[in-house]
């Protein structure tokens, strides 16, 4: 991964999934707990700036455009 804090990518085998890969999790909080009924809950909270959020959404939109173009070529 480059020196960026994160990257957004898609796994070609799983067309419906996007992945956010973090280089540094120092600004992240992860909670994993189980309630009295045995139900497990997991929460991940990330501290990101507005410009970083815009980059994430733009990267995701860009990947969707590429995926649509690839599907048109396969047909």
Image (cartoon, helix red, strand yellow):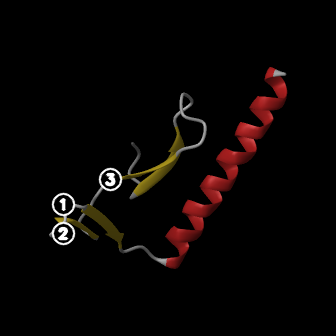
Q: Is 48 or 16 nearer to us in this picture?
A: 16
Regarding mark 3 in the picture, which secondary structure is present there?
A: loop
* Up/down of 20 relative to 41, above or below: above
Pinpoint residue 26: horizontal percent, then vertical percent. 23, 66
Give whichever of 49, 32 is nearer the camera.
32
Residue 44 sits in which quadrant?
A: bottom left
Look at the picture and state if 2 lies above or below 42.
above
What residue appears at the point 60 percent right and 36 percent down from the top-left corner?
A: 15
Q: Earlier in the sequence, mark 1 or mark 3?
A: 3
Residue lying at 61% horizontally and 54% vertically, measured from the top left: 59
Depth order, front residue of 22/34? 34
Mark 1 residue element: loop
Residue designated by label 3: 23
Q: Position of residue 50 (x, y in %)?
A: 52, 78
Quadrant of the rendering where the N terminus is positioned: top left
Q: Which residue is mark 1?
A: 38
Q: Which residue is denoted by mark 2 in the rendering?
A: 35
Q: Nearer the viewer, mark 1 or mark 3?
A: 1
Residue at coordinates 77% horizontally, 39% vertically from top-left?
A: 68
């Amino acid at each position: 991964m480059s020196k960026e804090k994160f990257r957004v990518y898609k796994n070609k085998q799983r067309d419906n999934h996007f992945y956010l890969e973090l280089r540094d999790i120092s600004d992240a909080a992860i909670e994993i707990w189980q309630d009295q009924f045995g139900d497990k809950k997991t929460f991940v909270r990330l501290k990101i700036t507005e410009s970083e959020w815009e980059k994430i959404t733009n990267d995701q939109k860009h990947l969707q455009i590429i995926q649509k173009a690839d599907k048109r070529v396969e047909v």
